[in-house]
Image (cartoon, helix red, strand yellow):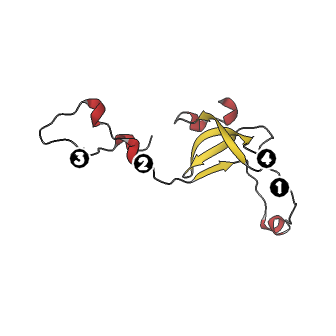
Amino acid sequence: MRDNDIRHLEMPDFDKQEGEQLTDAENRPSLDMLVNVPMRVTVELGRARLPVKEILRLTPGALVELDRASGEPLTIYINGEPFAYGEAVLVNQERFGVRLTAIINADDKLKSPREM
């Protein structure tokens, strides 16, 4: 876990009256302030490594083989950090979505999605 994890930040309580004591539950920082913070969500289908020579030869309709098989879990990143695994789903006839199948905790970051 990182030192700058939000759960370890001390947050002043501006609602507290001077001299008023708070319980432990009230001392914890609220995540409500983060509700409207935009975050970059990325879903990784797979990866490929190609030399520039091959990339320059790509044309519309060309296929790029990825390092994952069909049906393997997709990796969901939030702000570049692995957050969860999921599967692609058809939301309606025109759009895809991702159904979360497992949330990654600190210990799971070292495991393969197949081990989850």
* Disc 4 versus disc 3: nearer the observer: 4
Residue 34 numbered tag: 2
Disc 4 target residue: 93
Per the model, the C-alpha gap separating discs 1 and 3 is 54 Å
Q: Quadrant of the N terminus?
A: top left
Residue situated in front as seen by the camera: 77 or 88: 88
Q: Are marks 2 and 1 in contact (CB under 8 Å)?
A: no
Is there CB contact under 8 Å for labels 1 and 4?
A: no
Q: CA distance from mark 2 to mark 1?
A: 38 Å
Instruction: Give the labeled residue for mark 1.
Output: 64
SS class, disc 2: helix
The CA span between labels 1 and 4 is: 24 Å
Quarter of the image where one finds residue 104: top right
Numbered badge on residue 30? none
Please identify the residue farthest to the left as the structure is shown: 19
Which residue in the protein does label 3 denote? 14
Kind of residue at badge 4: Gln
Please, what is the three-letter code of the amino acid marked with disc 1?
A: Val
Q: Nearer the viewer, mark 1 or mark 3?
A: 3
Q: What's the residue at 24%, 30% (across, down)?
A: 23
28 left or right of 53 in image:
left
For residue 3, say whether it is visible: no
